Image (cartoon, rainbow, N blue to C red):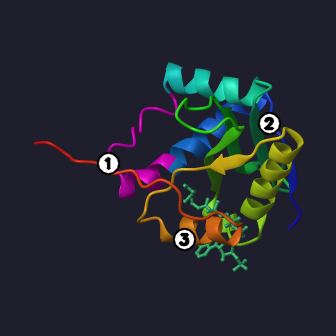
Amino acid sequence: MSFIIRKANLDDLPEISKLNLELFNIQHQFDPTANLNWSMSPDGQEYFKTRISAEDSFTEVVENENKNIVGYIMCTILKRQLYRIDAKYAELESIYVRSEYQGAKLGSQLTNNFINWCRENKVNYISLLVDPKNEEAIKFYRKLGFSNYDLVMQLKLE
Ligand SMILES: CC(C)(COP(=O)(O)OP(=O)(O)OC[C@H]1O[C@@H](n2cnc3c(N)ncnc32)[C@H](O)[C@@H]1OP(=O)(O)O)[C@@H](O)C(=O)NCCC(=O)NCCS
């Protein structure tokens, strides 16, 4: 099978939204606060459009031989939190490869493209959030060189 990885454009919005919803369905199994209405909502659509078009964002898609989009990555430069040192920060916000295409290094290629883009843009630190129960994704990120950073804790009140 051959694949093309390319920069996303606004025509990809419906497919990216669908893939994002598939990702949220996975995420929802780990975290019930993941909002399954987000991807198709006006706010979600605006957010995707910005990430696809803005100079400070990085969105790429994977196309299969039939020109169907089977994976994507969406990332952005972060506004520095004032309590952090003066450096350039970026976040890998979401990445998803359809299950039948996983394991073919597509996720690695997408992430390495983003890392290269960060180097070109003089980014110093890349972070991402992943659910601690998503062990496969954690393994994937570790293979690419990511290591533990913040630990986010939560208390659910009745
Ligand atoms: C995580 C994800 C993007 C990885 O994409 P991929 O194209 O399947 O990954 P690659 O083929 O580039 O895998 C690279 C390495 O990551 C690890 N890895 C990837 N998928 C894995 C899996 N399902 N189980 C265990 N390890 C896995 C493997 O060690 C692999 O190395 P190897 O090929 O030497 O064995 C993809 O599996 C996915 O979309 N998962 C579901 C959504 C998700 O969890 N996204 C992250 C949310 S934070």
Secondary element at tag 1: loop
- To which residue does mark 3 refer? 136
Closer to the chain start, of discs 2 and 3, is 2
- To which residue does mark 1 refer? 32
Residue occupying the point 76% across, 24% down = 54
Residue toward you, 110 or 19: 110
Closer to the chain start, of discs 2 and 1, is 2
Chain part drawn in magenta:
24-40
CA gap, disc 2 and disc 1 = 29 Å
Residue occupying the point 62% across, 39% down = 85
Badge 3 amino acid: Glu
Q: Where is residue 105 in the image (x, y as percent from the top left)?
A: 77, 68
Say whether residue 114 is left or right of residue 20: right
- To which residue does mark 2 refer? 8
Secondary element at tag 3: helix
Closer to the chain start, of discs 1 and 3, is 1
Q: Position of residue 34 (x, y in %)?
A: 39, 43
In the rendered image, which quarter is residue 143 located in?
bottom right
